[in-house]
Image (cartoon, helix red, strand yellow):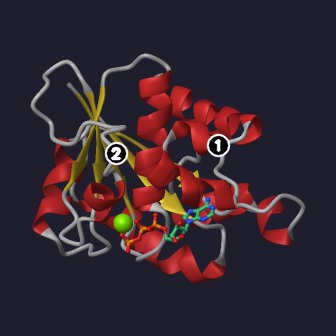
Amino acid sequence: MRKITICNGKGGSGKTTATILLGLALVEAGHKTKVLDIDPQNTASRWISDGALPLDSADASATVLIDTPPRLDNPDLKESIRDSDIVIVISSPSPADLFTSQDTAQLISELQAAGKTRLLFNQVQEGTILSRGLEETAKRIGIKPLNSVLTRRQCYQHAVLLGWNALPPKAKEEVFKIALEVASL
Ligand SMILES: Nc1ncnc2c1ncn2[C@@H]1O[C@H](COP(=O)(O)OP(=O)(O)OP(=O)(O)O)[C@@H](O)[C@H]1O
Ligand SMILES: [Mg+2]
């Protein structure tokens, strides 16, 4: 079983959205995939209501994507970070997210997480000043960024409820790229 924790201490950074999109893409690519929702808000469990993605982690051969709460002092989050093969910190490129993303990076290093840690930029808007400074922002956060980013698209809000086919081809391609990059880490 491969465990992938998606985290950031900041609420609304896109943890649940990324967890579900990556899950949908991995299922589409033929990977056995499950979502484990350890956030007491239960957003992922509530959004995945149509059975598009199995919830729970009973299958030993599956990739498990773990959606986490926006609280760095949460013991379940810490255990998940320690236990995972891959930890994805998701952050917008905005200065407003910088400090919490740095704190998240600090926690991961304090916990001596054995898995690989990567940064996934979310809500990226092409052509903006922030989108041109991603490399520098990643350096300030202190985590190696994935090559691909998640842009801001309204269809992602639809897809978490309606499933993979709610995405137009360009969005599918974007999410596939991220999912395959994460799967090959
Ligand atoms: N790439 C994106 N494009 C458009 N909307 C997005 C994107 N990522 C996230 N959102 C929207 O931003 C809001 C917050 O996203 P989400 O719920 O995934 O964050 P979260 O980190 O799980 O929040 P919390 O910490 O409260 O659990 C949601 O309304 C979601 O639809
Ligand atoms: Mg959430």
Mark 2 close to ligand 1, CB under 8 Å: no
Percent coordinates x, y for residue 178 in the rendering? 58, 36
Choose between 72 and 139: the one closer to the eye.
Answer: 72
Number of residues whose C-alpha sits closer than 10 Å to that of mark 1, classed few (under 14), some (14–19) or many (20 or more): many
Choose between 33 and 116: the one closer to the eye.
Answer: 33
Local secondary structure at mark 1: loop
Mark 2 residue type: Asp
Lower position in the chain sequence, tag 1 or tag 2 = 2
Give the residue at mark 2: 50
Percent coordinates x, y for residue 61 in the rendering? 20, 18
- In the rendered image, is residue 185 in sight? no
Number of residues whose C-alpha sits closer than 10 Å to that of mark 2, classed few (under 14), some (14–19) or many (20 or more): few
| Position of 171 relative to 1 (above/below) | below
Q: Residue at image x 41%, y 77%?
A: 11
Give the quarter of the figure containing the C terminus.
Answer: top left
Quadrant of the picture in which ligand 2 is shown: bottom left
| Position of 114 relative to 49 (above/below) | above
Residue 167 image label: 1
Mark 1 close to ligand 1, CB under 8 Å: no
Mark 1 residue type: Leu
Q: Residue at image x 11%, y 66%?
A: 75
| Position of 174 relative to 110 (above/below) | above
Q: Residue at image x 15%, y 41%?
A: 56
